[in-house]
Image (cartoon, rainbow, N blue to C red):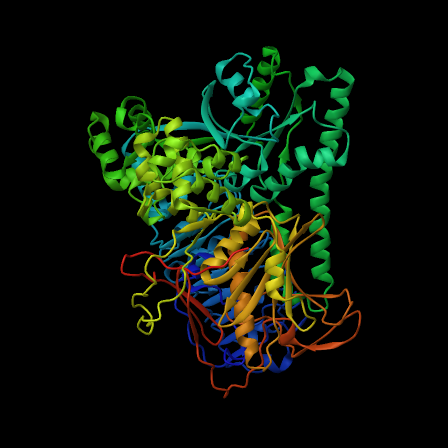
């Protein structure tokens, strides 16, 4: 099938494509004559007629059932051989006779070992994929390819160290080795090889730490240069996250551990948002992050919950009852979210308030909690096994290999739940016991393999100097915000840092940002020049807007603050009404809220910088939009009838005196009836797909999806569990259902009247699926499965979508048959596979305006450009409708 005959079923958004590609290659694709594609044909042996064509240069055999390659040596002119996603367990030694091979792909098989004497025949090999196998070593004769091999992918195997033979590949430019068991990287890998692309995520690295590797090859080289030029230090730092329901005792434990005495916390002193502190014990530094337990705060928690941390899950034994509901609310919610967000975390359950329970009751609750937590892990394991079996049982299982591999990867990820510790927080002996338990676990290399990390001394010197600046510099002591250039200047004034160049400083700041000591959002343009030496300032601003009891906070805004914002008590009443009914806050209301909180916290001097003036947005709004917490909305009284005809890239003329900008906070939306009424009800003929989430839709996920989707389409309605988008007059409904065991997001689009309209409709749906999939990457333990319900009324069957790549859907069928009702349907009614004759002229692209920029739908792509549509006052324009 040529590209013209197929359909690009993963169009995505070009602005996001680079970051969405996995294991991509920068190399130019070679053109091969005599190319044969036998993909997805369920082959178990090589066809004899193919083996007779010795002139073939390229052979694609991916997604078949091959175990052996008997006769492959007859194709002596092969330059490209694709054997991905087969059932190969024993390396096919017969391929050693293919001496002209330039590209070999054996990824996603079951290969455990590669014998010596094969690669010595491949003097021209440029590209080798061995990822997603069971390898832990490579043959020494791979060095024979040193003069040719440029691309190597070993991800998702079992390598403990970098094989020495790789250091002999003197032309290697791209090297992927994610998701192995590496603790250390050799400096020669970066000093002696011409690497341009290197990926090493999901390894328990100590040297360099992953936080350094995440900065890319240049930062890794700088790290090794620092190691050679100065002394090294072992960094024993543990990010410790305290999670649990409200009033469980998280803050009490934090403060008692830190002060080394029992501390009684009053209810009004409970955590609002997140509180950060440090605790030092026997050479280890514990960075405590105390997360508020109310559900309202969870929308911002996801920004700070990170992997490679110790999670202390605090459970109030006085509140806990021996019932499923109690477990679900106090424990299950957190375990599920950890399984989805940081599936390899270590969890230490801590039971509190045991002084309010009888001794026998405490033991019963401990057993009940541990049993149910282990049952959750077993249920997850069983579900994954069930999903895998379902895919293997599908008649055309070769079309689902990518999904199968993803599930097999997830089988290797699981929370490590330690034995529950019960404490009376008012008994310091119990606090000491907890302290000893924590220390015992972090010293255990089987539990924390990379707790000790090797750092150049300059990293620790910069960190210490930053702490000193925060404590002694009056200008930054309160808020911790500092200009990047000023920070560099102040650090350079210190004798031991006088030679610190800006590039090295930025590398160190990236490291400190990733470990959670400072915050530097260099990827957000308005914030790239500001470093937050104390993350507390961000948490203070977030917790003001995303918090429990926000309506009460609005109602209690003091009159003097209203006067300072040129507002009245009536304005405050309108703000409350607008927020209750539409979950929207105007910029003036947000300024008033934040002024009260920032002034209260002694941060008056950063108010204007963070919040902005009445005519200009501050840095806070860039943060809120970046993390999809809110959506900017501009309502106007109407369009300007005297405006010029709109031209792409030219200023948009608005009606003068438009209303003040508002911000929609989807997390506060409540009703969905008006959106569903605007949609007009579901119809049996709708194009209809469901994205199933296991174990559930993460808290806040749907709200963030709405913000992103509404940013692309300027006409939209948003509600609690529904969102309606309009593009070129075509409506698309997004609806969430988050019941236990039946969690999905549903997409519906009206069936086109003419066959030519299917292309546009599927492009529309695929745009949202692309955004959904990109967002889901933040939850690596989350399983997604896309299904199309059978179009026969009341038939419960669903068609599982096959794998998707960047060019075509995997399936080649024109018709699909339901296995329950036996009815047949055109594939284009179920999957984004649109039939089109090669000579059919391409439909024109559709142009429309979005709040982020321009977007066009071509024949099978979606392109979004970052181009603001500005009026003469340089204000971004966006027309939106909300319920």
| Viewer-closest of 188 and 467 | 467
- Quarter of image, res 400: bottom right
The residue at the point 46 percent across, 65 percent down is 122
The residue at the point 57 percent across, 37 percent down is 345
In the image, farthest residue toward the bottom: 839
- Quarter of image, res 804: bottom right
| Rendered location of residue 82, percent (x, y) | 54, 68
| Rendered location of residue 862, percent (x, y) | 46, 68
| Rendered location of residue 148, percent (x, y) | 39, 63
Q: Is residue 708 visible?
A: yes
| Rendered location of residue 679, percent (x, y) | 60, 65
Left or right: 140, with 765 as reference point: left
| Viewer-closest of 271 and 358 | 271
Q: Is residue 370 above or below residue 296?
A: above
Left or right: 218, with 540 as reference point: left
| Viewer-closest of 13 and 494 | 13
State how many labels appear: 0
Left or right: 66, with 444 as reference point: right
Q: Is residue 275 above or below residue 189?
A: above
Q: Quadrant of the N terminus?
A: bottom right
| Viewer-closest of 40 and 340 | 340
């Amino acid at each position: 099938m040529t590209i013209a005959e197929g359909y690009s079923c993963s169009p995505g958004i070009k602005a996001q494509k680079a970051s969405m590609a996995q294991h991509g290659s920068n190399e130019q694709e070679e053109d091969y004559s005599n190319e044969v594609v036998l993909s997805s044909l369920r082959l178990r042996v090589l066809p004899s007629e193919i083996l007779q064509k010795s002139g073939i240069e390229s052979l694609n055999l991916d997604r078949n059932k091959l175990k052996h390659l008997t006769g492959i040596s007859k194709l002596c002119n092969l330059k490209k051989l694709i054997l991905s996603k087969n059932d190969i367990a024993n390396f096919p030694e017969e391929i050693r006779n293919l001496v002209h091979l330039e590209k070999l792909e054996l990824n996603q098989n079951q290969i455990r070992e590669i014998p010596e004497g094969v690669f010595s025949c491949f003097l021209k090999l440029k590209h080798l994929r061995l990822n997603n196998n069971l390898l832990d070593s490579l043959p020494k004769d791979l060095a024979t390819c040193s003069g040719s091999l440029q691309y190597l992918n070993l991800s998702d195997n079992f390598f403990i160290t970098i094989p020495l033979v790789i250091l002999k590949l003197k032309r290697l430019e791209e090297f992927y080795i994610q998701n192995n068991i590496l603790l250390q990287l050799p400096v020669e890998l970066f000093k002696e090889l011409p690497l341009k692309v290197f990926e090493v995520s999901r390894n328990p690295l100590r040297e360099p730490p992953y936080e350094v590797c995440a900065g890319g090859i240049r930062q890794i080289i700088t790290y090794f240069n620092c190691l050679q030029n100065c002394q090294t230090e072992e960094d024993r730092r543990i990010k410790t996250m305290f999670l649990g329901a409200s009033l469980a005792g998280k803050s009490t434990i934090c403060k008692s551990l830190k002060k080394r005495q029992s501390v009684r916390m009053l209810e009004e002193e409970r955590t609002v948002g997140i509180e950060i502190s440090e605790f030092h014990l026997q050479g280890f530094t514990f960075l405590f992050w105390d997360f508020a337990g109310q559900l309202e705060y969870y929308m911002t928690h996801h920004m700070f919950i990170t992997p490679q941390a110790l999670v202390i899950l605090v459970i109030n034994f006085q509140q806990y009852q021996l019932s499923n509901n109690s477990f679900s609310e106090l424990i299950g919610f957190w375990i599920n979210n950890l399984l989805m967000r940081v599936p390899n975390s270590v969890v230490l359950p801590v039971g509190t308030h045991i002084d309010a329970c009888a001794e026998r009751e405490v033991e019963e609750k401990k057993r009940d909690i541990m049993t149910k937590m282990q049952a959750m892990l077993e249920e997850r394991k069983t579900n994954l096994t069930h999903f895998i079996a379902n895919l293997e049982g599908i008649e055309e299982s070769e079309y689902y290999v990518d999904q199968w591999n993803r599930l097999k990867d997830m089988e290797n990820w699981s929370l490590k739940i330690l034995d529950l510790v019960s404490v009376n927080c008012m008994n310091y002996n119990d606090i000491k016991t907890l302290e000893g338990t924590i220390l015992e676990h972090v010293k255990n290399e089987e539990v924390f393999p990379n707790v000790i990390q090797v750092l150049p001394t300059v990293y620790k010197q910069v960190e210490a100097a930053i702490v000193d600046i925060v404590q002694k510099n009056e200008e930054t002591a309160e808020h911790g915000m500092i200009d990047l250039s000023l920070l560099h200047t102040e650090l350079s004034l210190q004798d031991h840092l006088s030679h610190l160049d800006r590039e090295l400083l930025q590398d160190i700041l990236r490291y400190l940002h990733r470990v959670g000591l400072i915050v530097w959002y260099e990827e957000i343009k308005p914030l790239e020049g500001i470093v937050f030496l104390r993350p507390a300032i961000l948490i203070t601003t977030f917790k003001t807007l995303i918090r429990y009891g926000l309506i009460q906070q609005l109602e209690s805004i003091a009159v003097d603050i209203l006067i300072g914002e040129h507002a009245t008590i009536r304005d405050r009443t309108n703000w409350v009404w607008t927020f209750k009914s539409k979950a929207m806050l105007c910029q003036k209301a947000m300024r008033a809220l934040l002024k009260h909180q920032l002034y209260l916290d002694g941060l008056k001097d950063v108010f204007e910088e963070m919040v902005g003036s009445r005519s200009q947005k501050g840095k806070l709004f860039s943060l809120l939009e970046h993390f999809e917490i809110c959506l900017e909305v501009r309502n106007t009284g109407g369009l300007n009838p005297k405006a010029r005809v709109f031209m792409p890239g030219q200023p948009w003329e608005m009606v003068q005196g438009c209303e003040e900008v508002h911000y929609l906070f989807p997390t506060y939306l409540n009703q969905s009836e008006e959106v569903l009424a605007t949609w007009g009800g579901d119809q049996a003929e709708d194009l209809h797909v469901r994205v199933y989430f296991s174990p559930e839709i993460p808290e806040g996920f749907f709200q963030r999806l709405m913000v992103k989707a509404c940013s692309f389409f300027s006409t939209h309605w948003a509600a609690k569990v529904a969102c309606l988008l309009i593009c070129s007059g075509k409506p698309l409904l997004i609806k969430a259902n988050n019941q236990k065991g039946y969690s999905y997001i549903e997409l519906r689009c009206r069936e086109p009247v003419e066959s030519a309209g299917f292309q546009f409709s599927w492009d529309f749906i695929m745009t949202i699926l692309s955004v959904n999939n990109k967002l889901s990457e933040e939850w690596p333990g989350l399983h997604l499965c896309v299904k199309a319900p059978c179009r026969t009324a009341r038939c419960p069957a669903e068609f599982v979508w096959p794998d998707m790549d960047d060019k075509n859907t995997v399936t080649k069928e024109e018709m699909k048959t339901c296995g329950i009702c036996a009815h047949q349907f055109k594939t284009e009614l179920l999957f984004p596979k649109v039939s089109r004759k090669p000579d059919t002229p391409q439909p024109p692209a559709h142009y429309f305006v979005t709040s982020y920029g321009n977007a066009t739908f071509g024949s099978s792509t979606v392109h979004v450009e970052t181009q603001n549509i500005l009026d003469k006052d340089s204000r971004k324009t966006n027309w939106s409708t909300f319920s």
